[in-house]
Amino acid sequence: MSADTGRTGAADITRREAIRRAALLAGVALSPELVTFVARAQTAPAKSYLTAAQQAIVSAAAERILPRTDTPGAIDAGVPAFIDRFYGEFMSPDDQKLLVAVLQEIEMAAKSAQSGSFASLKPDQQDAALRAVAKGQEGRTPSSFALLRSTTILGYFTSEAVGKNVLHYDPVPGAYDGCVPIDQVGRRNWTT
Amino acid sequence: MFVQGSGTAQQTYDAIVVGSGISGGWAAKELTEKGLRTLVLERGRDVKHPDYPTAMTESWQFAGRSRLSRADASRQEKQNRTGYTTHPASAHWFVDDVENPYSEVKRFDWMRGYHVGGRSLLWGRQSYRWSDLDFEANARDGHGVDWPIRYQEISPWYDYVERFAGISGSRDGLAQLPDGQFLPPMAMNCLEVQVKDRIAKSFGGRAMIIGRAANLTQPHNGRGSCQYRNRCIRGCPYGAYFSSNAATLPAAYATGRLTLRPFSIVTEVIYDPKTRRARGVRIVDAQTNQTTEYFARVIFLCASAIASTFILLNSKSDRFPNGLGNDSGELGHNLMDHHFIVGARGVSDDFGDRFYKGQRPNGIYIPRFRNLDATSKQQDYVRGFGYQGSASRDNWARGIKELSAFGADLKADLIAPGPWRFGIGAWGECLPYHDNRMFLSDKLRDKWGLPTVTFDCDWKTNELNMRKDMKNAAAEMLEAAGLRDVTPFDDGSAPGLCIHEMGTARMGRDAKTSVLNGWNQVHAAANVFVTDGACMASASCVNPSLTYMALTARACDYAVNEVKKRNL
């Protein structure tokens, strides 16, 4: 398992306590080793992997792919930070190259059509640039735009903001009903 | 070699059990409950119920969400071949491939976990009885050797293990899939019920049943009932599915007669030519590299098909130059697994206003319907297959497959449940072939200096012919069930991927052609028993773990009686 070997600070202790309380509520006894393990998995990274300019494009593009409406947008859900770390520690070298390439392509599309940096454009101008990139890649495998898009969707729908508040969050259902009227549970996917 | 204090009282027990997975856990429980002071040797670390580190972890608490970091993934390239085992929620239950290498003449996917509980923590929990269709199969069509037992002999042991383990399921009265001692069945969802009815109508009453699963649908023997989280592979804090950690090992500890030693890699069984019995086993401590011997009157090898066979092959002596109990030359041969990843999927336009509540850790099962009798006999293959499957509504992940759509409409669409989809995949029987084998290699040694396993195994004509029918029959049923966009698939599966390794120390009636007798005893070393997948003389098409449980409990009962009669 990935292990961030950091110092144990006040934030860690608070987090450990929070995990312990959550586990007690769920009726689970946790050993000290287990608490450490889970706390480690939750520790946020201090460093970033993409440059500031790349991060600006990631943020703006992710927010247009899944924009804020009456539900949170990609930025609300922490997707840009997720993509940065996913790029740095989780993506294959091939995908890393693709991600860097799509950010360049988006920036070039913005500059050629709108003569401005992608991150500085208005939302509808950003959408036009993304559409141009997507159209240009139709039929291409692998598609770098598809990678950015799928990573955004993954980061969004597995985030805490969406998992707890947008999808139907029920970590311990306790029972199974195989056929309920959808209005009884809401027209939302379950958080899994 | 330094051998620590051989022969001392501290290293002597009534029984030794090698391995703590499904079979080893049962052996520990049965032998201790019947009065034997028992040492369980487990090569991996200890895992105590309910210390399952990711059991309550949500997706956002994993930095890579569903993916391992590049650094971690590089250590589990073979374990990752399943596509699901090395998710960050479960990767810690699977071995480090760099520390635990093996070789392949042909691709073989060896998925395993080295820790107390073994794969009992990770298994699919589908629990089906074999029938005489299976136990008589070798005798009937001449493949392999005849099983030395029939259903009647194992049936009471199925009753016994089901009552303790807790198997939920329906009683369906099918000759090819005998009913057992079941807890109440789980429910099918809307679409599954519709498909079930339509299959029965279109195919002369062909059965589709809810999976029979070792998941508790009510509290049972001090363990909690299923909470419908579908996170079983992480370990269940409620003890709601059967595992050694939650069920058999606590029972063994309760007797006061269990000693469990983790980090103990059994390297060989020590054979005494004077008594023609095994004296004990030799281990290397996985952490200290120290060698130690342990002694007992009875030894149960329950380390998994491959690992138990490894130990026997590595136990060479003047009497057994090719491995203990290998007079027949069959040890390591007749390697089997189920072949799968073939079936069909389809979409339903019904039930748009319906959903399900809870995540059911179980699916549906379509029991074997081929080669049951003259009317279902197939021309180009023997034996048969069953299907596992389920219906569900697509979740947000359906959005990943699209290539270009983005924006507010996409987001709203992916938040809502998608269309209902139903899919089935077949689990097919593989024949026992002498050519399909594992053997030890001295060239590649592991970090403890031990030889490693090489696999040479593949599917042959009977399996490949069967696969065509597995695919076509699936599509035919889904079409008849009224689904649209029915898509047959055969994505191929290398041996091992189903994680049902069997047959490498098979049971049989004749010591010349088999390794074990009808009581799972090594023919030529009567106090050595092998009760894991290695013992299987054929593979059936149903999941094998329940049969390992029943065979283990039966062999333990026999062994203890033999000890009491002073025959062992």
Image (cartoon, rainbow, N blue to C red):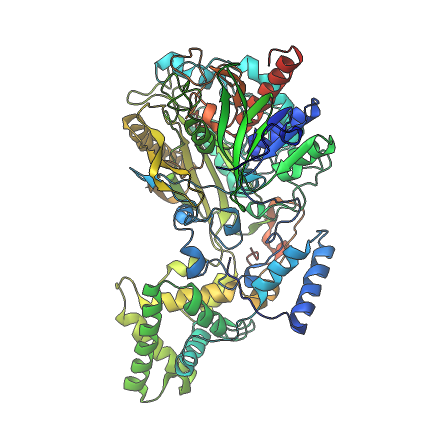
Q: Residue at x 65, y 39 (%)?
A: B246
Residue B503, how many percent across, how many down? 42, 25
Residue B500, how many percent across, how many down? 45, 33
**Is A29 on the left or on the right of B242, as rendered?**
right
Q: How many marks?
A: 0
Residue B129, how many percent across, how many down? 53, 24
Up the image or down, A163 lies above or below B269; here it is below
Is there any visible trace of residue B295 in the rendered image?
yes
Is there any visible trace of residue B181 in the rendered image?
no
Quarter of the figure that contains the C terminus of chain A: bottom right
Residue B7, how many percent across, how many down? 60, 27
Up the image or down, B415 lies above or below B203; here it is below
Q: Residue furthest bottom?
A: A115
Q: Please name whichever residue, B176 or B197, is drawn nearer the observer in this view of the structure.
A: B176
Q: Residue at x 63, y 31 (%)?
A: B11
Q: Please name whichever residue, B337 or B41, is drawn nearer the observer in this view of the structure.
A: B41
**Is B121 on the left or on the right of A25, as rendered?**
left
Q: Please name whichever residue, B389 or B329, is drawn nearer the observer in this view of the structure.
A: B329
Name the quadrant containing residue B314. Answer: top left
